[in-house]
Amino acid sequence: MKLKLPKGEFKAYLFDCDGTICDSMPLHYVAWKTVLAEWNCEFSEDLFYAWGGMPVTEIIASLNQRQGLAMPVADVQRRKEEMFYAHLPQMKAVPEVLEHIEAQHGQIPFAVVSGSTHESVRASLGTLNLLHRFETLVCAGDYRNSKPHPEPYLMAADRLRIAPEHCLVFEDTDMGIESARAAGMASVKVPAPWERVALAAV
């Protein structure tokens, strides 16, 4: 399977991390389910993918509000990250995205724009030996408004000194695509793991 890029001469590529560069969403979900079970907190797989790109602290706060819980946000965030790191050796890159990173590295600048923390993104990209490919990382804590607000992608474009209309965004969630669109950027949707398997079988 190959990603079909929109037409245009792009001067920068901006990538989401989890589920886009890194095939890490299944590992994140295992970590979430393990930690949230201690609080009898439900987190369906559908909702997990729908909230892709949302910072961890916002996810915990939203689950608290929805289910009338009082999970300590900082503690649950720390435990969830630790659980995810324990599974990092199993992680692989998304091959359809890696192909474009390999093809354009050194030709145009790259940025990562993620709802995860700097520590999580650096750990994931470091595991895949890709961290050095990116000029800048825009992560949770850098911006005030998370995806689907355009601020994270506009911040990345500003750091790279590339106009938004000359940036191409790679994203795996509707929330991320909406953020890119609001920033005035072209985008390409990276299929979810089960969709990639189905498309490869066609």
Image (cartoon, rainbow, N blue to C red):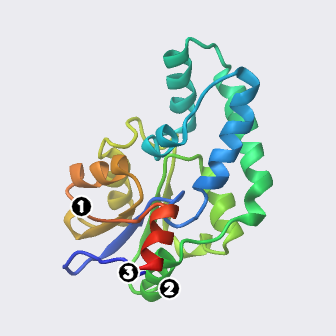
Q: Write down the quadrant of residue 24 in the picture.
A: bottom right
Of marks 2 and 1, which one's residue comes earlier in the chain?
Answer: 2
Q: Which residue, given by chain and number where applicable, does mark 2 sit on? A: 102
Provide the secondary structure element on which disc 1 rests.
loop
User: Residue 199, image x and y in percent?
Assistant: 42, 74
Between marks 3 and 2 in the image, the one whose residue lies nearer the viewer: 2
Residue at position x 30%, y 49% in the image:
179
Of marks 3 and 2, which one's residue comes earlier in the chain?
Answer: 2
Looking at the rendered structure, the number of numbered marks drawn on it comes to: 3
Provide the secondary structure element on which disc 2 rests.
helix
**Three-letter code, disc 3:** Ile
Q: CA distance from mark 2 to mark 1?
A: 22 Å
Rendered view: 194 above or below 155: below
Residue at position x 56%, y 18% in the image:
64
Rendered view: 123 above or below 110: above
Q: Which residue, given by chain and number where applicable, does mark 3 sit on? A: 108
